[in-house]
Each structure stands twice: as structure tokens, then as C-alpha cells.
Image (cartoon, rainbow, N blue to C red):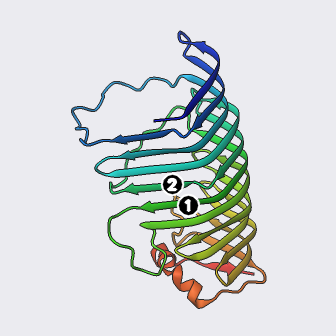
Amino acid sequence: HWDLISIDVKELNLDEQVVAISDIALEKVHLQYDQTEQMTEDAKPTQEPVGLPDIRIDEIAILESSMSFSSGQQVIRAAVNELNVSIDEMNLPDSKIELEELQLKKSFFYVQSLSVLDTTSTSTTANPWKISLSDAAIDNTNVKVDLDTTANLSKQFNANHIDLKQLNARLENIYYDSKTIQSHVRQFNLYSDDHLVKASGEFLMNDSIIQLNEGKVGLDNSKINAAGKLTYSNQELLAPESRVNLDLNKTTIFLKDLDYLLPVVEKSNYSGPVELT
């Protein structure tokens, strides 16, 4: 059900599959879909996927709306109090989206996924997605992810149960494609399992390096000021042949804070060198 759905269409060409929209406004729109039966392999479509239509949107505004999807293996819920998006370019046929500004306030996102992700697929698309965002502001937003149904009784970080509260962030120059992720993080703070986490800096990751410039990371009482680079190959971040270089300055780490992150360190199984300056 909904109070307001407004779509201002500038151009509609069904023959050319072109739709140009000035703005989309949703207010108090609530959508729910429950998939009670799983699709069998025989029932899945076998035809080749068709190209995406050319849909162009300038502005999106969502107020006090929600979405819920559930199946036997997944649950996805979103409650958006306020979301505003300004779009410079949307080119779906070429898998390219350029966003000018994104503002998200007082919202909640929940994902539960019990299925095992298939990482063996080697299929590639003709046009890998390229997404950029000039400026993002996120205020007082919560994100929760559960990858199994067991209770999270541990006081340490558990990647199967992520609970992020009061996320506030200011991000600039975000870019993503199939090989690269980068962002300038001006402000980032949240509570993870009631631990206060703060971060800022310039971040770059591609298929051979992870680099952090002017990085500042805080976990409760611990504070790290660092610039660093992790060089790796064969898509194995922490293989023995990888190299880690860290330049630390005015850094304080408390053992009780380090204990919270021990599961991350143990799972890395890294045995290569670390160069500290």
C-alpha cells in the first residue's frame, strides 16, 4: 500500500526501449513479497538474457517507506526514513551509473542469507558495472546481516552476525568496477556489537594492492594513525608471498580492543612479512 507514488516521465519510446524520467518520489510506500515455493531447475528460464532497457533517471526521493522480501533461504528488509539521490548519468545498457549525491537518514537494512554463495561461476558480462558517487551522507542508519541461524553469544567480532548501529558517514569520490574500489572517507563512525568504531582516510583496492592514505581508525579506546599498502597476487590477499607495509604514527592499541578482532586475525592465516615504520 502507499500514500504517494509520483513519476515525472520526460520521454517514453517503447520501440527503442528508452525511458527518461525527471524524478521519482515515493512516500509511505510499503511493499512485501513472500516466496513460499522454491523455483526448481526445470522451472527456471533457459533463454538467453536480453539487453537492459535504456532507463534514465535524474532524481529519486523516498520518504517513510519499506520493503520486505522473504524466501526459504533469504530475508531482505529495508525501512527508509529518508533517501535522496541525484544522478548525473544512468546508462544501463553500458552498465554505467554516475551519482552526484546520496543522502540517507534514519534508516534500517536487514539481510539474512542461509544459502551458500556459488563462487565457482566463471561467467562474465560484456559490460562490467562501473558505479561512481561524488558525495554521500549517511546519518543514524542501522545495518544487520545474519548468515546463519545460530545465536551470536560471542563477545568477539563474528562475520556471520554483523550488527552495525548509528552509522554516520561522509564519503567522497567513490568508485567501483570489477577490479577497483576507492573512496575518500571524511567521517565514518558506528557501533559494532556495542563497540565504537571510527575511521577516515583515502582507500584504494584493486586486483593487486590495498592502499590506505592518511588513515585514522579507532576502536573504543584504541587509536591508529597509519598509511599502508598491502601488495598481493592471485586474488589471495594474505598469501605468504604478499607484502604489508605500514607507517604508524601516534598509535595506541588496548588488548581488550584487540581481543574483539581476534577472529579476523585468526582467519587471515597470514604468515608473510610485515614492515613497520
From where the camera sits, is residue 119 visible?
no
Q: Is 251 rendered above or below residue 264?
A: below
Which residue is at a point 56% across and 60% down the rendered structure image? 142
Residue at (33% x, 57% y) in the render = 114
Looking at this view, name the residue that lies furthest to the front. 3
Q: Dot 2 surroundings within 10 Å: few (below 14), some, or many (20 or more)?
A: some
Depth order, front residue of 84/37? 84
Marks 1 and 2 in Cβ contact (< 8 Å): yes
Q: Amino acid at mark 2?
A: Phe
Residue 163 falls left or right of residue 202? left
Q: Where residue 207 appears, x then y in whole percent? A: 59, 54
Count residues near mark 1 (Cα–Cα under 10 Å), then give few for <14, some for 14-19, many for 20+. many
Q: Residue at x 51, y 38 (%)?
A: 29
Where is 90 relative to 214, above or below?
above
> Residue 184, can we see it?
yes
- Quarter of the image with the N terminus in it: top left
Residue 218 appears at what percent x and percent y?
68, 76
Residue where numbered disc 2 is placed = 109
> In the image, is residue 161 above or below residue 38?
below
Residue type, label 1: Asn
Query: Which residue lies under the disc numbered 1?
Result: 142
- Residue depicted at 74% across the width and 74% down the height: 226
- The picture places residue 99, in percent across and down from the top left corner, at 69, 39
Q: Position of residue 265 (x, y in %)?
A: 51, 78
C-alpha distance separating marks 1 and 2: 6 Å
Q: Which mark is residue 101?
A: none
Furthest residue toward bottom: 255
